[in-house]
């Protein structure tokens, strides 16, 4: 069988139709991927939410709160107050990262 023989009209139409379907699917997948990549993190909560920054600042606040508790228990009141101030700063930064939006729990 000669593979270079001209194709029938039906064969050419099938090849063209298949190429159109493949191109349409590729275009659709590309557009949907672009749309998904354009959505903000955290499910599109809106309001300029940066969930990674929010969770990072909350982790920092948790660390400083625990440090303040340990320092207070050890009788280091001045150091505990400084650690508490750091915790409050981290909480303020987390609130700013939310920007009025919401983030899913980490």
Image (cartoon, helix red, strand yellow):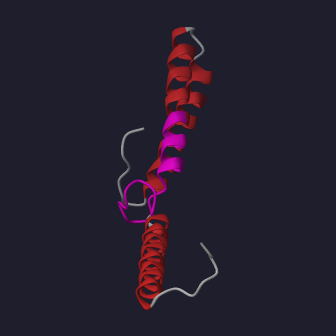
What residue occupies the far front of the structure in this picture? 1
Q: Is residue 7 magenta?
A: no
How far across and how far down the image is residue 44, in percent?
A: 37, 62
Q: Residue furthest bottom?
A: 9
Q: What stretch of residues is rendered in magenta?
A: 40-59
Q: Position of residue 43 (x, y in %)?
A: 37, 56
Question: Quadrant of residue 36 in the image?
Answer: bottom left
User: Which residue is at a point 52% across and 48% down the rendered structure image?
Assistant: 52
**Residue 48 in magenta?**
yes
Q: Residue drawn at (50%, 27%), measured in percent from left and top?
A: 65
Q: Residue at the spot x=45%, y=69% of the render?
A: 29
Image quadrant holding the C terminus, namely top left
Tell me: residue 79, above or below residue 56.
Answer: above
Residues 62 and 52: in front is 52
Viewer-side residue, 30 vs 39: 30
Up/down of 75 relative to 14, above or below: above
Q: Which of the 4 quarters of the picture holds residue 64?
A: top right
Q: Residue at image x 54%, y 41%?
A: 56
Residue 48 horizontal/vertical position (percent): 45, 65
* Quadrant in which the N terminus appears: bottom right
């Amino acid at each position: 069988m000669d593979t270079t023989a001209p194709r029938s009209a039906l064969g050419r139409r099938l090849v063209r139709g298949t190429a159109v379907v493949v191109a349409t699917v590729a275009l659709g997948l590309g557009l949907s991927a672009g749309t998904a990549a354009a959505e903000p993190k955290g499910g599109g909560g809106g309001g300029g939410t940066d969930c990674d920054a929010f969770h990072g600042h909350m982790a920092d606040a948790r660390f400083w709160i625990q440090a303040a508790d340990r320092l207070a228990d050890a009788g280091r009141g001045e150091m505990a107050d400084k650690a508490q101030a750091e915790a409050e700063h981290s909480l303020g930064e987390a609130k700013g990262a939310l920007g009025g939006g919401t983030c899913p729990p980490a």
